[in-house]
Image: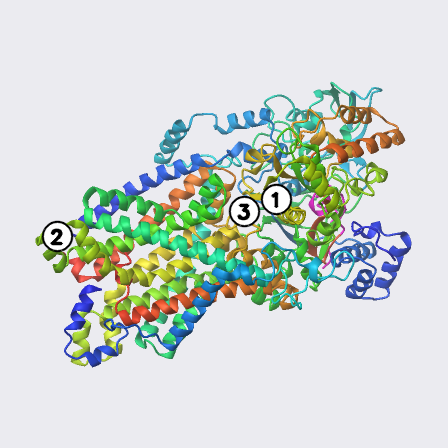
Amino acid sequence: MMSQLVIRRIGIGIILLWVVSVLIFALTQVLPGDAAQIRLGQQATPETLAALRKELGLDIPWYMQYVVWMGNLLSGNLGISAAGGATIESLIGNRIGNTVFMTGIVALISIPLSVTLGLLAAMFPGQLLDRIITTGTLGLIAVPDFFVAIFLILLLAVSLGLVPAVSYLSGTEGFWKSVYVLALPIATLVIVVSAQMIRMTRAGILNVMGSPYIEMAILKGVPRKRIILRHALLNAIGPIVNVIALNLAYLVSGVVVIETIFAYPGLAKLMVDGVQTRDIPLVQACGMIFCCTYVILILVADIASILSNPRLRHPK
Amino acid sequence: MSDTTAAAGQSPNPDIYDELPDAPPKSRLRLSMVGKVSVVIVAFWVLLALIGPLIAPYGESHFIEDDVLGNPIDDPSFMLPDMGLHVYFGTDYIGRDVFSRIVWGARTTIGISFIATLLAYFVGITLGIAAAVAGKWTDAILSRLVDAILAFPNIMLGLIIIAAFGSSIPLLIFLAGLVYAASVFRIARALGQDIMVQDYVEAARARGEGLWWVISREVLPNAAMPLATDFGLRLVFVILFISSLSFLGLGVQPPISDWGSMVRENLQGLGNGIGGGALASITPALAIASLTIAINLIVDDISAQAGGSLAKKMN
Amino acid sequence: MTINRPGDLDFNDLSVMDRETVKSALRRGATRREVMGYLMASGATIAAAGSIVTGASEALAATPKKGGQIRFAWDVHGPSDTLDPILFTSSLDYGRGRLNYNNLCRLKEDLTVGPELATEWEANADVTEWTFKLRQGVEWHDGSKFTADDVIYTMSRHLGKESLSKAKVLVASISEWKKVDDYTVKAIMAEPNAELPIILGTFHFKVVKNGTTDFQNPIGTGPYKLAEFKPGVRSVHNRNDNYWNTDHEGPYVEQFEAFGITDNVARVNALLSGDIQMMAQLDPKAASQVEASETAEVFAVPSGAYPTISCMLDKEPGNNPDFVKGLKHLQRRDRILKVVQQGLGSVGNDQPVGPAYGADWCQAANDPVTHPYDPDKAKHHLKKSGVAGAELHAAEIAPGMTDICLMLQRECSKVGFNLQIKKVPNDGYWGAVWMKKPMNVSSWNMRPSANIMMTLAYKGDAPWNESRWKNDRFDKLLGMARAELDPAKRAEMNCEAQKLCSEGAGSLTPTHRAYVDAKSKKVKGFPRVPLAAFGGMEWPEFIWLDA
């Protein structure tokens, strides 16, 4: 049963990746201008444009470009950057490491934090603690992340000098030094993603609290704390894991503002650079990485919710 | 959710149940104190969005310093002041009245986010319910398309579409609508599937009621409340999405004022302190925060009373 | 003391007496803040005053020290970062190029040329052949000898139809480079050009080793050896202790690390917190924030670089002379200079040459400006033109570009003219909008001479003649000036050309901007060449860190 479900999910994931590859390719085709034009910029002349297009392989028709790309992709070759001539692997290489590192640290901090705060809020709904947590988290998601980031930089880096203002790793730092250097973007991202996870944890638990069997437990006189920890949390795992997965996907692909402000070389900024320089192979590679991440995370979340939910575990 | 409500209705001891946050719906909405304050705040901003241009002291692209503050060229010590007699929150980085721009920006920001969220709901619910009701191939195709949109980072989608068509307010609304319609689709589809297998729906269909009757009389009313509780959060995401685009220079374009881009374009002033232009960035940030917090507190209030939240249906 | 023009922001622009006043005040122990206060009371902006005091402190500075590490952050970077000189785009590329390579000739602060890899050069009588004697004893980073073959290889990459060089327009008149012997090369030209040595001093003509095709990890003859290069991430450069230049003790700094922080606000904060020691492209609005800090200071060099609005004269509505004239009269040039550029620049006169060009700038033709701010005249011309409204396509391709457009729009609405601004993204701008939409914006760096600048952007048949202005007399003047070796006669031709351009071309050029950067107070010894950010990127072998 389980394995069938998982195989089906993986099948869907593969179809999804193909849909995404077509979508990415289609979108990159509507982009005005090409890498040659962007690279030469103001200094372009028809002659240099033609020469550079030839060099970059932009003079072949679009359907051939798709075929070439898919061929390369299936043989594990991501191609050559149209913007600078480096291989895509070399551009992406350590940025994947950087992105995974930052995502990992943020997840390690924010997931336990959010679940704890969400639980606390759900234990005392409507009371002061709950109000503080819900309003506080709302306040934090309601402000643009760049405002939060610059505010933290001004306060902690410029005024107090506690942590660096740029999170720029040379690759030789040890683990704790890296965490120190990344302190500000980590703090900003923890604030940004925790807010939503706290809200969803609270909502998920309160939702389960309304179901008939919890009601039974209440009627039987089981203490509220015990109900929440024993029964409600377990049953709310599905939606909570889902929100965590969505937030992790966001941390991998959507943190372009934070990467820009802290000059942290991660994947999201690379993708934005790729779009802006019309570096189609790079955009396609990043797009595929992001979508794979999303598909895998959602798959894991699905499996987790199936495992945690008896009704799904044993479908009728 | 319907089953919750139904179960609660039979509860032998309603007093105990009342202590829970997800109490069954009351016949009449009674807002808490916080809820009432929130309504006032939202009403204030909406009113401002409607009549703002009538009460704004200056136009949104009006450079004021030659009118009221003297000519900077003649005065070597001239610095753009933050607090002036006629400018409540000072001037922005280029000499426009921050207060007036916030008032004008209310219209843009609230307008874009409301229309985009409504669009997302309209499209998402229509397709989501359609997918749930039709099932099979319609469902499979729609779901994969929506998954593809969700798998695609929002910013990437925004970047490419804006690069292709140029940034304009209708395009921003379309873009935000598209991105969030995908999330609404998932919720609506899940709710729809849930409701379609309920006994009362099956009974109605057995009675020979048409599909349309079932959707409009049974599915939509039962899905309405869970969908509504998500509205406030979705609205915040639209505002933040547009301000992220502003960060990349792709959001609402000058000289039109919008809160997110105001925060962005005056960010430099934050380092100069209150006397040096920080207010031009802080006040629009506060405006965004007050509006979105208030909307969400109202939604929290309503959903706490209506019982149930939508978390279960999220995915 | 009086500050004459808003462009007076360099210590060296002050009269000798004023310079001494500032220096002696500092020597007496006056603080930076005190001297700046004094300067600002005399009419300098805060940034100008800061820059002047920086110059004065440097003039006082002690002897350079060796050692230390410097991290610098640039505004533009990405996967397109390159170490291939013919493709250099950003000032980060220029900086890396100057660390790694050398030119044949070096452009000096006064824009004359001095020797670098070439020791001397001379032209034949009709200036159609230039002969360069090369420096002997120079070694590449791998220890091999620098010879004429390297120069021939480098220069040939700029020639021919297939060349990808961004600067090939500048050397289009060269038909061939010839090796005379191992240390002599000769350029053969189809038409005379007296400015070839100047052109060869610019960024795209860095000399690469014969046969180099892979620019991921290229060697050079420059003051620093490349240790690491990751496009869009960073580069590391270690001191070349075997550097050929023995005129000074440099290079001084042990190691440079270059990377990009694209966000303006974040870049300033990184400098203020001490995480970096140099940053390019300071937003003029942040000048006061930098000046208020204990550790950092503004570094501004007046230049001829300019943002401009072009009305294409071959399209509606730019083909209507009254329309263009009307708009030219609506530019509040000093106001833009003050508000948008915070005084860091000089007033422009709708032609590309500004006071920073020194002798090339013609005061008689440009001061006062041809089209002063005059709403009445503007109204008259716009009415006469019959044009009801216009659309201006703008992108933030230079700092403050959008703001300049907004200020023009504001003035237009005051006289009842409807100027719509269509803001478009930066990426793709040059290909899709520039020289295509009837009204668009553009931005130019300063070039080493007025003639090069005017030829690039205004000559009738120039590919980048952005306003499509054609004036036979102007074109003729440019050619005559290029072949003219008498400075007085050249100046006369220059004056006439600038006047014609200011009157007739479709450009609205309200200001020239200074290159405004910022650095730690501890980094000293910068040359001030006005051709690019940070003193023309000439700093690598000269600056040092005062520990």
Name the secondary structure under disc 3. loop
Q: Chain of mark 3?
A: C
Label 3 sits on residue: C233
Label 1 sits on residue: C418
**Residue C243 picture quarter:** top right
Q: Quadrant of the N terminus of chain C?
A: bottom right
Q: Residue furthest right?
A: C17
Q: Which secondary structure class fits the magenta region best?
A: loop
Residue situated in front as seen by the camera: C535 or A136: A136
Q: Position of residue C385 (x, y in %)?
A: 68, 35
Q: Chain of mark 1?
A: C
Tag of residue B209: 2
Q: Which residue shows up at 14% across the image and 50% down it?
A: B210
Mark 2 against mark 3, which lies toward the viewer? Answer: 2
Q: Which residue shows up at 86% across the image and 63% down it?
A: C25
For the residue carrying disc 3, how many other residues have a C-alpha within 10 Å: few (<14), some (14-19), or many (20+)? many
Q: Which mark is first along the chain, 1 or 3?
A: 3
Question: What amino acid is labelled 2 in the image?
Answer: Glu
Question: What amino acid is labelled 3 in the image?
Answer: Val
| Colour setup of the view | rainbow
